[in-house]
Image: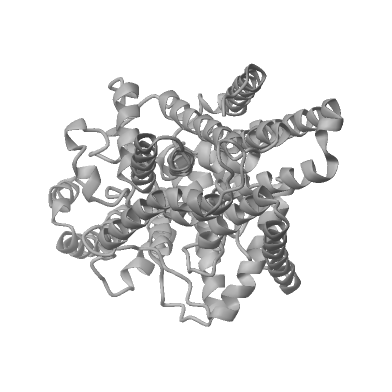
Amino acid sequence: MKTNDNEMRFRWFTAGMIVVLGFIAYANTFAGEFVWDDASSILLHRHVQDPSKIGQLFLEDQHAFGRGQGNFYRPLLSVSFMADYAWAFGGQIEDGVPQPAVFPFHLTNTLLHVGAALWLLALLCRVGAPRFVCAAAPLVWVVHPLHTGAIAYISGRGDPMAAFFVFAALWFALWEGSPRRRISGVALSGFFFVAGLLSKESALVLPFLYVPLLLGAPTRGGARPDRRVWVSRLPALGVMAAILAVYAGLRTTVLHFASDSVMPSAGFGTRLLETGQALALYLKLMVVPAGLHMERTLEGVPVWVGFVGLVSAAAMVALCALAWRRGYYRIAIGGAWFLITWFPISGLIPLNAPMAEHWLYVPLAGLVWMTLECLALVWRPQRAPVAAYCAVILCCLVLLAMTVDRNRDWRSNEALYTATLQRNPKSIRVHYNLAATYQDLLDNPAGARRHFERVIELYEDKKGAEGLEPTIFWNDELEAHLSLGEILSELRPHEAMRHYATVLSITPTPDTAAMVGMAAFGMGRCSLQLDQPAQARRFFEKAVEFIPELRPEVERMLARPA
């Protein structure tokens, strides 16, 4: 069926609005800084900084140069960082760490986000969604502030990148026409699926997401699909299944990396309740995206919230079934889209966090689509198009303002961690990262001391709440003691020595041996300050035992006149 001129003008105008609003939403991030995992993903990643190592990116964990492994196999994401780095780096180096310009990285994130929204528009047009839905869904989606954790945060690029490829794969999988065109569509769909999987693991939902489209998406002529159409769409599903099987095989064998993440060990009943709690909070944030932050927990969430979430999930399943039975296939497809993409992040499958806002990047598209299809069915905006589109514009402007405001939290490490602690003041890792930022980047020892002390207090509370022995220590807790010793050593050596002594009290392991060595070195320095050379020598000998590289510095300090 040939698209008429009015329809083409509508699509181009909508695409233009998506581009404009998308860039307005994230333009204020272009002058931000590298934050959080950007250090391990880019600034410390020697392979990302060396184009000759591009092949190595396909053989290693994404955070191969970070503090630990996470079993994140995202080589295409790292390749995109490599391309940005090659453009951005002008030779600036501070304290041995390269300092590339941040603009190209943020520009790429925004381009991928806008591109994903354009593919969403193309897909909605392909399945015959009403004009109102085709325009409103991608416009609302592109400016929604829930996406800031995926777009304003450079290391969040995996979400828009994977979505860009997944949406494209769905569109190509629905190609119709001659056998040659269908074969091309299947091949391109498979290509984009592979690209999505190499961008982020979340792309593995594609075959499951394609099933409702295979069964319910109308033909190009608008006819309801029948068995002949279903059969013609099956090759794309077969290719997706084969790719997924190969990917799963590789990820569980040669491309499986050791992970430092600790998965929760709660029973199924607890996980089910937490799934409901998380879903209820997710639905609230999608409708009213206020109070956004990056460190969400379910601590203190009432039990009844979990039942509300589980009832909401059951209601959505029932709505999808009813819509399919009544012939409202797009409503059912939109609802299935949300449920399918939400399930991996629901909590039923143990993850390293109870919930995260950026995980909703793709599920939100399905919920917005389903909601607008329902509104179009009830409201029939074609009878009052001006009012309908004015409502969409107003909604987009409100969401756009919220997105621009939320972006300010991502402009620097200090801004991000401070904003997060306002919402979740008991986050140990955010207190630790803020303390490290003050100590290593901002030369603010008072601020560093305050937050390192808070880290220790929170760990002590954690031990008390979980009935753990006070002699059990986490690595971050030991490093907080070590950092406090360094901060206090010049002016308060006795107090510094108490922190060093805490680190020295543990039984060294391969992970903590270096910390024990540095604590002994710190004790030696404090002993020299207190005019105790014999004690200093003993501690220095212990330090060199764990860290032989310290010997020249130890000899220099011992040779210094008293």
Measured as percent of width and height from the top left, residue 498 is found at 41, 65
Measured as percent of width and height from the top left, residue 74 is found at 34, 47
Looking at the image, which residue is at 30% across and 20% down? 90
Q: Quadrant of the N terminus?
A: top right
Measured as percent of width and height from the top left, residue 160 is found at 48, 39
Looking at the image, which residue is at 28% across and 54% down? 525
Q: Residue furthest front?
A: 228
> Taking 354 as reference, is 163 above or below it?
above
Residue 427 seen from this side: no
Measured as percent of width and height from the top left, residue 508 is found at 26, 71
Residue 277 seen from this side: yes
534 on left or right of 303: left
216 on left or right of 109: right
Q: Which is nearer the eye, 142 or 402?
A: 142
Looking at the image, which residue is at 42% across and 27% down? 102
Quadrant in the picture for residue 144: top right
